[in-house]
Image (cartoon, coloured by chain):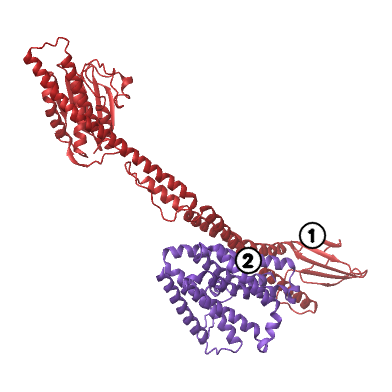
Chain colours: A purple, B red
Amino acid sequence: MLINTVLMFLRELLPLCILLATLLVWHRVLWRQFALYFALPSLLLLSVVSLKMVWISEQLDGLGLELLYSLFYLSCFILLCVSALKAQYALWTSALAAACLFSISGSNLLLYIWLPTQTENTPADLLLGAALGVGIGASIAVLWYYLLTELKQWRSSSFALLLSLSGARQVMMASALLIQSDWLVAGPQLWQTEQWLSEQSELGFFLQALMGYEATPSLSQVLSYLLCFVVLFWCCSLMERKR
Amino acid sequence: MRSLRRYLVTVLIALFTLISFVAALQSYKQSVSRAEALFDQDLQVLASSLSQQYKADSAQELGLALQVWQQGKLVYRSALAPERTMSDAEGFSEHNFGGKRWRVFRQTPNDVLTVIVAQPLQQRQQLADEVITASIYPVVLSLPLQAVLIWLVVSKALSPIQRFSAQLSSKKANDLSPVELDQVPAELDQMLKTTNQLFARLGDAFEREKRFASDVAHELRTPLSVLQVNLHNASQQWQRSGISDPEGSMLALQSGVERMSALIEQIMLLNRTNPEHFQARTEQLDLAGLCRQVVADWYPQIDNKQQQIELLGLEHLSLKGDAFALRLLVSNLVGNASKYTQTGGTIQLELSATQDKAVLVVQDNGPGIAPQEYSRVFDRFYRVGGDRHQSGTTGSGLGLAIVRDIVILHQGQIRLGPSDFSSGLKVTVELPL
């Protein structure tokens, strides 16, 4: 169905678009170099993951793909921390962080497009759904870019806060995959906010992409999220102070 | 520094895309939801029709009418169907029965069996409307949101131009300091630079002009004073030595030097009272008292020419102004009146006030000025009749120019007209209270 294609594209593209817009605000002056540093590893990683997806998914008792994605999410977070701490490497480390996220989104989308179940969707549905998803994602990225530019001028710490939320979101995603693969103990469920804000609602969708909103998070997810948020925020604060 | 065009284009396209796509998705979801309700209703209708076929009481009397004819005999009809055939024509057609208009479909799969199904047109229209309305609602509702967001984005984008305009309009006449703006967009950058360069050049030019006129006048004043003293001494020596001056060369020379001294004084005063340079020190003062002081200053000359001077009207008139400038204004008007009025003439000053302004009228019964000259006498160095004024008095042609500058400085008005006497000039000055 059309709506499924739109949601699939949005779920994969929105976090990437938000992260890219945030990083472009950061590297506004050197955006061409940033784009280059982002494009090359993105294409490389995407090609490798897509071409070897079957082989990867068969590794580690069939958990290869989940663990690789977790690794990408964690790498994304670590690279963001490094780029905040080391100004001289900031451009390429942050571009690489975005490339990690791109390789996950890209390979998921390619998988979705080439899945055998796609025979149920007409090419027109797929095309229209993809156009709607990409259009909404790109529009949110543009608006997010300008909003963040204004916020940064108004209060510089707002940028650090939003980048930290975005970084912690990647850890949230990694922890969810690790729990799913039984590599991390979930612990008790801390709260249930599904009835107030569903992850499937528009706002829930946006918050999930922006800060990894989870309606039913477990203890280990919340702890890792908070820890990583504090670490990245501290790194960003150090960066602001150095400036 | 960003481009206004790029900002507006990207943000507006993003807004339109986002809102349109989200509205389209909502339309899609609403339409699917309505269509599902419609299909569910069809299921209910079918169940209802089958219930009747098996003589069971159906709880719902739903919209479809159904007839089954076998070899020309009605073997089944639903509750809403009439006993006669609903349609004789194969395929789709429209007919009236049961007080309604129906859309009918007749199918004859073989020679013996005919199935006729009908649905009220109103019901079909209603269902179609529901689906279409559901798809239109999000698009219509998104329009006000789009309008508000466009207004916000355009206002935000144009705010540097508004700030620029506000800074320019709040500038005082003598403020030539550069305009400073934060986050200047690319389109405004050149305009701002050019404006500031213009201000800088204008400021330099004013400063040069001010300094030049002032320096020249100042430099000339000292040698002229020396010249005056030497002329006076030479004149005394001539008298003591008994040198006669039948052609009056010495007097002409003294008169010329005096005129030049007066001219230089006037140039310096003009320079001082120029609205572009003058920093007015406004204070509350009594214009009537100021007029009395000026009359007292000029009285020796007036008395010398046996002229009459009278001060009429209010005895106290308080207004806000620069004391030095207003004294100079009254002095120039009284001095002009005395200079250009014949011996034994009359000069009259009258002070009055309206709700918001003070009015000073200075008139005389001198020769006056032709009305066509009224606008020109305020020009610098312009003298009625040129240097050979019929009164024979020396003048610089700057007196009324200075008066006009002072009036402008006080945001007042000045008018010339014929005197209330049989001849002469009437000058009316209005100053805000």
- Could you tell me which chain the residue with mark 1 belongs to? B
Q: Residues within 10 Å of mark 2 (few under 14, many from 20)?
A: some
Q: x, y (%) of residue A161?
A: 46, 72
Residue at 61% x, 68% y is A39
Return the residue nearer the eye: B301 or B58.
Answer: B301
Return the residue nearer the eye: B313 or A41.
Answer: A41
Badge 1 element: strand
Q: Nearer the viewer, mark 1 or mark 2?
A: 2
Quarter containing the C terminus of chain A = bottom left
Q: Which residue is mark 2?
A: A134
Examine the image and state in which quarter residue B398 appears.
Answer: top left
Q: Which residue is the extreme one toward the left?
A: B240
Quarter containing the N terminus of chain A = bottom right
| B62 to B257, vertically: above or below | below
Q: Which residue is mark 1?
A: B94
From this viewpoint, is residue B81 visible?
yes
Q: x, y (%) of residue B166?
A: 39, 48
| A42 to B236, vertically: above or below | below
| B100 to A57, vertically: above or below | above
Residue at 51% x, 65% y is A27
